[in-house]
Amino acid sequence: SVQLQSPASRPLPHIRYSLHDPVHLRAKMGWKFADLRWTYVFVQVLAAVVSEEEPATCSSASASSSCAPRARSRADDCSVLEPACLASLNGTSHEDWVPLAEVMVVVEGKGRDHLHDGAISGGAWKERFRRCYCDTWSEQKFPEDTKSTEKLRAKLAALEGSSGKKTILVHSDNVEDGIGARVKKAVELVVAALRMGFFGVALAIPPSGSLLHPAGAQDWPHGAVWCHESSAESPDPPNPHEPNFPLACWRFDFQPDFLAQSSAPEVRTLLWGGPQNQTILSAASIERFNCMHFGGNDAVPADAAWKFHTREAPLVKEGRPMDVLARLFASARTFSAADAQLQGRREARCGFGDAGAVHVAMHVRRGDVSETSGYNLPEQLGARGLSEWLCSLASALELDSGGSRQLLLHVFTEAVGRSRRALWRAVQRGAMPGFTFKEQSGDDAEPLYHTLGTLEVAPTCGQVVSSDVHFVVNNNPREALLCMARADVLVTSFSSLGWVSALLNEGLVFHPGKDQKPQLLQIETHWDLRDQYLDWAPNWFRAGDVNSRGPELRRIRAVARNSP
């Protein structure tokens, strides 16, 4: 446990929390967890786009909020192999960090009943959406079996035939989970709705449980904040028998900062599954819809969408995803345009400025599942296997065919400690296979977010794979999610967080293979989606495909490079 400090570094009386004891935190904040062993604890204070003002009307929202792309994201990025770039990235990453003490002061002072007062609630969001976009509004029960699903499909077809208008689902998510799992479960429901016959889905992710936005900007200046369990402040070395993941907090509002969707529905809302000319809903939208919703907060059981997919036909058959998945990805990627700078979305630099490199982002999940969970590719392949895999990827992309480009690996991870020396200690205890850190001046400096290491086993394919590795460690999740979505190649772990970045990534995405699943993931459940839905997009592959599907990889890579 720690003694919390005020911003002026004065002890706060009567507020002492054990950071590895989530029970006390849940008692204060009303959090509920399906599984305390692995879940993220997170806080998101949704930015007040219009929340502390009189609610905006559809006609008063600015049509200029369509957020047209300004420029490619790499136009203002820098090359991480340059010392000045590395120093700059380290300097700006810390700007979004929020002391846990300040979060707990709000928890203690506001009380559970007032932690969301400054944000747009799910019910209010749906009502405002209804006024702006809907000609009709009705409640529909989520279908529980095949018969009720067919009945709903017939109802939707008849309604469109009689009204001449498309029918969409309007849904506000209230699942209490980590941000990756929450988004993945919400998208799971979106796909279910598209399969039912809805033209599209308007989705909000508002305050719920540990998503906070207390009213009053004076005593809460941070805007959106996400707190999650992190190993950064864990004991060094960690105790494997008593895992300890204290909370780390960052300014981060998922909807505008990642999706580029405004908190207010009248400004800029994504119509999931909609055609390209109707992906962006705003005050300038002309068409109105028949709108349905699935009822209040508890109307859709937590396992409803998962059960729906298990009883329906497979979403991917013989390697070909269903049309609803193509609609899902086309709409989300058109709307969010991860590789573009968008008005309304805070920009992030990733160190991808070297135009001569193929930037490979690798999510190495370690933070809240122990250092040896087996969830990530380096652990699954080992040091030599990782080096050989990178060479195989370079060969599949024909980078070794006389070209001047090389693979540059960027590892996104969490680790015990906040210094480069701590990473070196992790290597010494075998907790970071595949990498090493040569001693250099400043190794004890804190906090560290960006640094360079090297591959433990030098690539046998020569200069086509760089031995230098960019480590992004214990960093701002806003930047990590967006940068992974922008990489030329993304390699995920068994983790829903990396999956969310893959949702928007239009380059090559590699997920771990089925034969690499840890024992913990052998039984599929509705609440643990780490290893499910890994074949939904045509640009998603398994790690082993680098050795057998070269032509397909090159075709996807070529399309991504030539996209506007």
Image (spheres, grey):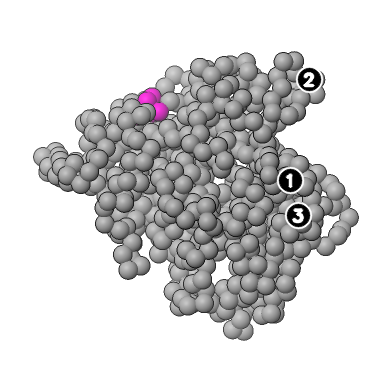
The one nearer the camera, 66 or 11, is: 11
- Specify the principal SS of the magenta part: helix
The CA distance from mark 3 to mark 2 is 33 Å
Residue 314 appears at what percent x and percent y? Answer: 30, 58
- Which residue shows up at 45% across the image and 69% down it? 556
Residue 134 in the figure: left or right of residue 89 = left
Residue 92 visible, this angle = no
The image quadrant of residue 398 is bottom right
Q: Residue at x 24, y 40 (%)?
A: 143
328 vs 29, left or right, is left
Residue sitting at the far bottom = 402
Magenta region, residue range? 122-126
Q: Which residue is mark 2?
A: 11
| Circle on res. 426 | 3
The reply to whether residue 449 is in sight is: yes
- N-terminal of the pair, mark 2 or mark 1, is 2
Q: Looking at the picture, which amino acid does disc 1 mark?
A: Pro
Magenta span includes 200: no
Q: What residue would you read off at disc 1?
A: 238
- Total marks in image: 3
Tag 2 or tag 3, which sits nearer the N-term? Answer: 2
Residue 141 placement (x, y as % from top left):
24, 34
